[in-house]
Image (tube, rainbow, N blue to C red):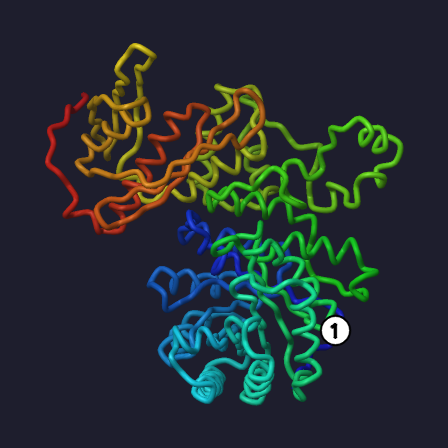
Amino acid sequence: MNTRKNKNRIIIFDTTLRDGEQSPGASLNHREKLEIAQQLARLGVDVIEAGFPIASPGDFEAVHAVAETVKGPIIAGLARCTEADIARCAEAVAPAKRPRIHTFLATSAIHRKYKLRKARSEILKQAVASIKYAKKFCKDVQFSPEDASRTEPDFLAEIVKAAIDAGATTINIPDTVGYAIPSEFGTLIATLFERVSNIGDAIINVHCHNDLGLAVANSLAAIQNGARGVECTINGLGERAGNAALEEIVMAIRTRPDLFGGVTTNIQTKQISKTSKMVSRLTGMPVQRNKAIVGANAFAHEAGVHQDGLLKERSTYEIMRPEDIGIDSAELVLGKHSGRHAFAHQLTKLGISLKTDEIEHAYQRFIKLADKKKHVYDDDLMLIAKEEMSEPSHVYLLHYLHVSTGTNAVPTATVKIKKNKEVIQDAACGDGPVDAALKTIDRITGIEGRLLDYSLQAVTIGKDAMGEVSMRVAFGKEIVSAKAASTDIIEASARAYLSCVNRLMSSKKFTNLRKPVKKKKVK
């Protein structure tokens, strides 16, 4: 039986680390996943879906680490309805105080015919058997009938009832391809409550994708029709067009209690802005300026009529306050005269945990940056700390960079790279200063990369803002992603590329990619 006491609280199931990381271009290393998981716990999410353990050894290790270290939320792992997937998932989430196995199996006619090539009866049998198998490892088992919004209503009701009878404590109804519209999806949830006799024995979740831009609207319609759990991601990250955005769902419920029957969430809304920025920086996925709730323009007012109304009464044009989501207008600004204590205190305030030696390294980067720009803002500090956390083993370090370029000049870069105590120098020409710098690094390291994606974003304010470079590089068949930031975009590009090289080398898959080159040693 479902023993949940408060049926007016919406369970927030965050899948940023699983579905969110599947966003094209998003990538997180082990340390970054832990940082986000800790922040999600501070945010107050009820469930963290930490990954898909059988997908790779790295995914398994990340889920296991989150289960070991993050306290408070339920820690879930995803598994297909196979014994191998479920056993691997159970092992990954085992260290958690509150573990969950989340199994899924496609149920729609189109998936049954073309993907699974199985009849309804076979799907039903496999789902029930998998749930019962998962219950041997874990009391908390969730089942998702994949592509539920395109599944025949009678079969969907049948499999939901069977899943609950088999022991599933949560049933998730996914709009897997973002096909539904709000009135339709709300009716689907209401119909399940009418047709499934044992539906009160489980919590009903929804998981909506944003292919038609309706993920949040569909999720809210589901809540109005009885759903009490929402699967979502920070900033709406996810496959294709993404998932329902956590911040939009939470603030809609908070702002319009009159339409949602007084339901609440456990989310600490003042942590929303901080969490959004962290996820954006660590995944390399920028938040559009006009994004609801967390976009840079969300609380900006330029029109004269709006400004006049705001000065008289903020509620004339603001339905939420910036403070509600943790935007503090009195941001602490650090400069080159700020000491280690102020620096460390501000990192703690931002929710960033560094080891003692990492704090010292980060502080030295901060001092160098403070010499280049008058004020160092919170975003600057987050970038500095992120680079310190994500730096793998410092195999190669950028020691010196000089580029020569112009409209009538051949772009040339001279680079010195430090490896252990040795400094190696070389130079090369390219189509532009970035290309020249990267080609020089190729010559020095003997590892040739092919740039697949390159993006540059100004991530702090002012003319002396830091630019963050995100890139994906192919080294043979291996693809590596990295980010770096600097007030000099050529330097940021070189550092990001070197970070890709270092990550490749730390993975021990680079031995056959080396090309012997002669390098100039600098004494």
Q: Position of residue 45 (x, y in %)?
A: 62, 60
Q: Position of residue 293 (x, y in %)?
A: 67, 45
Which of these two is toward me, 148 or 338? Answer: 148
- Residue at coordinates 27% horizontally, 44% vertically from top-left? 474
- Residue at coordinates 21% horizontally, 22% vertically from top-left? 428
**Location of residue 506 with respect to 228 vertically, above or below:** above
**Residue 428 appears left or right of 269:** left
- Residue at coordinates 30% horizontally, 42% vertically from top-left? 473
- Residue situated furthest top in the rendering: 408
Quarter in which the N terminus is drawn? bottom right
Secondary structure category for the residue under label 1: loop
- Image quarter of residue 12: bottom right
Q: Position of residue 408 (x, y in %)?
A: 30, 10
Quarter in which the C terminus is drawn? top left
Q: Position of residue 127 (x, y in %)?
A: 47, 83
**Location of residue 114 with respect to 356 vertically, above or below:** below
According to the picture, the residue beneath numbered tag 1 turns out to be 6
**Residue 114 appears left or right of 246:** left
Which amino acid is tagged 1?
A: Asn
- Image quarter of residue 230: bottom right
- Residue situated furthest right in the rendering: 312
**Location of residue 343 with respect to 94 vertically, above or below:** above
**Location of residue 263 with respect to 322 vertically, above or below:** below
- Image quarter of residue 193: bottom right
Which of these two is toward me, 469 or 354? Answer: 469
- Residue at coordinates 18% horizontally, 30% vertically from top-left? 443
**Residue 337 appears left or right of 409:** right
